[in-house]
Amino acid sequence: MGQTTGLAVAPQCLAALERANDVRLARAQLKRRVKAGGLAAAEVVLASPWQTRTMSVGELLMSQRGWGRVRARRLLLSLAVPENKQIGTLTERQRLAIAAVLTAGTTGLGIA
C-alpha cells in the first residue's frame, strides 16, 4: 500500500521541483538584468512579474548595483514595509511608494 502512494507522488514532486528550478533560473536572470542596469527595480516592483511574486522586496533591492542589506533596510523602514515582504503581496500604496523613491533617487531621504 505504501508503494503505490510513493509512485503516484513521484511525478507531482518532479513537477514541483521543475517549477521551482524554473523560478530560480528566471529570478537569477532578472536579478542579473537589474544589476547590469538593463531593468529598473522600480519597474519590477510595479509590474510584479510571475518570477518575483514570492521574492522578497529586500532581495530585489539588494540585487541593484551599490545596494546592500543596510541601504535596503533603511529604505523599507522609511516606508514601513517589512524587508521580507513578498513582492506579490505588496499593496498598491506600497508598490507606488517604493517605485517613487527608487525612481526619484534616495539621496534626499538620507538613505544613500
Image: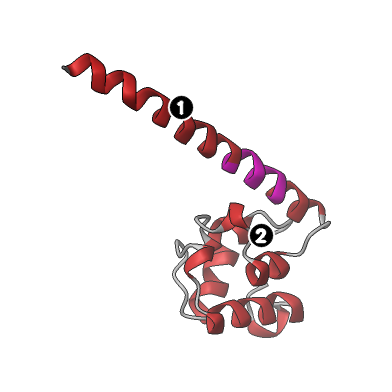
Residue 69 visible from this viewpoint:
no
At horizontal 54% and vertical 59% (from top left) the residue drawn is 53
Which numbered tag is attached to residue 67? 2
Q: Amino acid at mark 1?
A: Leu
Upstream in sequence: badge 1 or badge 2: 1
Q: Determine which residue is flagged by label 1.
A: 14
Residues in magenta, as a range: 23-30
At horizontal 70% and vertical 85% (from top left) the residue drawn is 108
Q: Viewer-nearest of labels 1 and 2? A: 1
Identify the secondary structure beneath mark 1: helix
At horizontal 72% and vertical 58% (from top left) the residue drawn is 66
Tell me how far mark 1 sits from mark 2, CA to CA: 36 Å
At horizontal 64% and vertical 59% (from top left) the residue drawn is 49
Which numbered tag is attached to residue 106? none
Left or right: 70 with respect to 30?
Answer: left
Q: Quadrant of the N terminus?
A: top left
Q: Quadrant of residue 11?
A: top left
Q: Position of residue 97 (x, y in %)?
A: 60, 82
Q: Position of residue 91 (x, y in %)?
A: 50, 78
| Residue 71, above or below 101 | above
